[in-house]
Amino acid sequence: MLSKLVADGRWNIVFAPHQRLVETDEEIEEFLSDFGEHDNLHFDLDSFATVDGSYTRMADIYLGDSSSQVVEFLISPRPVVLLQPPEMTDLFAQRAGYNILGETVESADRITDAIADAPARFADYEDAQREYAASSLGETGPDAARNAAKIIAGFADQPRF
């Protein structure tokens, strides 16, 4: 997948896998070191940006599997392309309903076309993304922190048993 994207050259790519993958896959660093240097590809395996939402906030398109990262990405709905290799049944994605958020790609041959098509197809998924984000994340607008603080303060003022 990375080889196809780098060779295509139309996009800047940040490869920042979920921290649990990096913690459990001893071969990932070797694989990436063998991959080489490319102007349009940035690897990040262990900086704080991999867990603080930096990448999901700045990305124009989400390309990845069905992970909680896609939900973080939907704080600001944008095009989504989900990866689903045919030999893997992702029951989590099916149960979570991620298939309504963007195109699901099952073949590496389709990845570059799906990314290229994603902005034009975004309108097909935008309402579903907004509804999914609202039900998964709750309030995310500018007053979210203030409203959460009021709820916590109200709870703290409740009599204790």
Image (cartoon, rainbow, N blue to C red):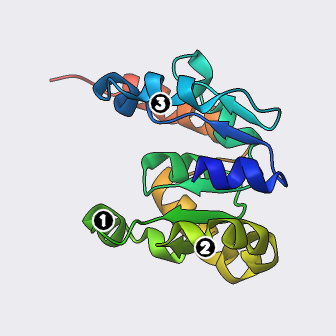
* Labels in figure, total: 3
Which of these two is toward me, 53 or 144? Answer: 53
Image-based side of 12 in relation to 51, left or right? right
For label 1, the residue is: 90
Residue 121 visible in the current orientation: yes
- Between the C-alphas of marks 3 and 1, the distance is 24 Å
- Between the C-alphas of marks 1 and 2, the distance is 18 Å
The disc labelled 2 sits on which kind of residue? Arg
In this view, the residue farthest toward the bottom is 124
Which of these two is toward me, 160 or 152? Answer: 152
For label 2, the residue is: 110
Q: Secondary structure at mark 2?
A: helix
Label 3 crowd bin: few (<14), some (14–19), many (20+), radius 10 Å: few
Q: Quadrant of residue 143?
A: top right
Q: Secondary structure at mark 3?
A: helix
Residue 74 visible in the current orientation: no
Tell me whether circle 3 and circle 1 mark residues in contact (CB < 8 Å).
Answer: no
Q: Picture coordinates of residue 110 (x, y %)?
A: 61, 73
Image-based side of 152 in relation to 55, left or right? left
Residue at (55%, 27%) from the top-left corner? Answer: 34
For label 3, the residue is: 31
Q: Secondary structure at mark 1?
A: loop
Label 1 crowd bin: few (<14), some (14–19), many (20+), radius 10 Å: some
Residue at (74%, 79%) from the top-left corner? Answer: 121
The disc labelled 3 sits on which kind of residue? Phe
**Image height check: is 120 above or below 21?**
below
Q: Picture coordinates of residue 58 (x, y %)?
A: 76, 40
Q: Picture coordinates of residue 20 (x, y %)?
A: 35, 30
